[in-house]
């Protein structure tokens, strides 16, 4: 299998996660379900005087990612069904078929993994003195930039590897492609003023 075929397979398999991430960012900004727009850490600080996660990690974003992950996977399954060559490239569909229940289950799992795997990064950034939604300069800034792009992907691809065969090399190719895709999507969202920073 050549690299172009593998990259096509990656997008065919996890495009729903990209869609869910974008939709969730829009959802968080919409004036709906505002009762959920509360920090997951309830504003509490640890002994170091720093927040656990910060204001940007809200229940609205966390729960939104889970449910939009499920919805996006169901919709993406329908798209794949309408485009047989795309369906043939989808690793998840190849193992579990293309029907509502497995698509919904996988999507909810991906959304949960995406949301949960962002939390350790937020925790570490607060300890490093980086404010929520902000970036840093120098080597520390570069390291956290990379982590920001791949933290959620590490969880999503881990879940994918539990649902269907993913080799060690494929796992890291998913992460590499995801890094560049996430960076590109963030630039587009920043240009559209949906994101406040890159």
Image: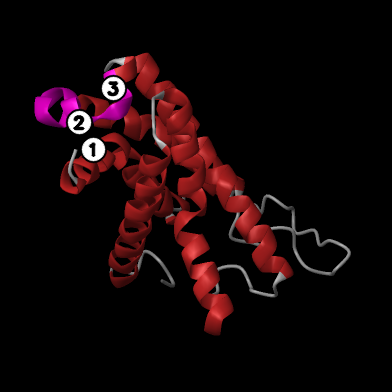
Secondary structure under the numbered disc 2 in the rendered image = helix
Secondary structure under the numbered disc 3 in the rendered image = helix
Looking at the image, residue 120 lies above or below residue 16: below
| Direction from residue 184 to residue 52 in the image, left or right | right
Magenta residues, as a range? 81-94
Looking at the image, residue 21 lies above or below residue 165: below
Residue on which the image places disc 3: 93
Q: Is residue 1 visible?
A: yes
In this view, the residue in front, 157 or 69, is 157
- For the point 61% across and 68% down, which residue is it? 132
- For the point 47% across and 65% down, which residue is it? 146
Q: Is residue 136 visible?
A: no
Please report contact status of discs 2 and 1: CB closer than 8 Å, yes or no: yes
Secondary structure under the numbered disc 1 in the rendered image = helix
- For the point 31% across and 68% down, which residue is it? 187
Q: Which mark is residue 89?
A: 2
In this view, the residue in front, 123 or 39, is 123
State how far apart marks 3 and 1 are (Cα). Answer: 11 Å
């Amino acid at each position: 299998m050549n690299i172009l075929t593998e990259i096509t397979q990656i997008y065919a398999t996890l495009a729903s996660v990209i869609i869910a991430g974008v939709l969730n960012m829009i959802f968080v900004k919409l004036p709906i379900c505002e009762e959920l727009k509360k920090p997951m850490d309830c504003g509490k600080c640890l002994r170091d005087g720093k927040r656990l996660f910060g204001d940007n990690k809200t229940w609205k974003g966390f729960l939104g990612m889970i449910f939009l992950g499920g919805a996006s996977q169901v919709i993406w399954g329908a798209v794949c069904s309408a485009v047989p060559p795309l369906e043939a490239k989808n690793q998840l569909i190849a193992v579990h078929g293309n029907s509502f229940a497995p698509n919904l289950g996988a999507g909810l799992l991906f959304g949960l993994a995406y949301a949960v795997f962002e939390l350790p990064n937020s925790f570490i950034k607060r300890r490093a003195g980086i404010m929520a939604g902000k970036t840093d300069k120098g080597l520390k800034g570069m390291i956290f930039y990379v982590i920001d792009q791949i933290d959620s992907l590490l969880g999503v691809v881990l879940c994918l590897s539990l649902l269907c065969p993913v080799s060690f090399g494929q796992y890291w190719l998913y992460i590499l492609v995801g890094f560049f895709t996430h960076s590109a999507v963030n630039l587009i969202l920043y240009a559209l003023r949906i994101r406040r920073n890159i």
